[in-house]
Image: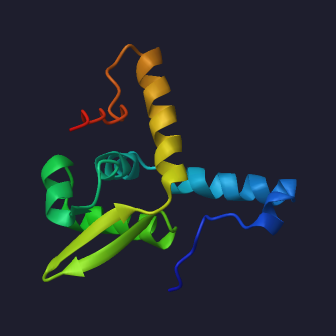
Amino acid sequence: MSKRSIQATPSTVTEPDQVFELAAEVFRVMSAPMRLKIISHLCDGERNVSYLLSKIDTTQPNMSQHLTTLYQAGVLGKRREGVQIYYRIIDDRVSSLCRAVCTQIAMDANFDSPMAEPSASPAA
């Protein structure tokens, strides 16, 4: 199975229908709450599957299915270190969009945002 990418190329940006198709693909990839949770936890940096399973209440097979979907869509990158597989966000547009949408929804519902911007570290 080839890796699909939701990256736009300059030639596709000029075609309105293709822009809408690419946008729909981004939203399709982000349409599962589990994938939004995964993206949220990976916004702070690379994590292994064990870490994600400790933070997100799901089964290992379900987690793997969602990670594979995000990887095949070009949202995540991965690397193997021994028996562990580490995932990281490689499409920052998706995490920015996810953060913006989830933060706005949380504000509208008077909830704390699950995707608040990480606080900046003080300069040393």
Name above or below for residue 93 compared with residue 59: above
Left or right: residue 16 versus residue 97 is right
Q: Position of residue 23 (x, y in %)?
A: 67, 52
Residue sitting at x 39%, y 47%:
36
Give the quadrant of residue 79. bottom left
Name above or below for residue 55 compared with residue 64: above
Instruction: Specify the farthest residue to the bottom.
Output: 1
Residue sitting at x 37%, y 51%:
39
Instruction: Specify the farthest residue to the top.
Output: 110
Q: Is residue 31 visible?
A: no
Q: Nearer the viewer, residue 62 or 123?
A: 123
Q: Position of residue 19 (x, y in %)?
A: 77, 55
Q: Quadrant of the C terminus?
A: top left
Name above or below for residue 33 compared with residue 69: above
Residue sitting at x 47%, y 16%:
108
Left or right: residue 44 versus residue 73 is left
Q: Nearer the viewer, residue 90 or 53?
A: 90
> How many badges with numbers are in the image?
0
Give the quadrant of residue 123. top left
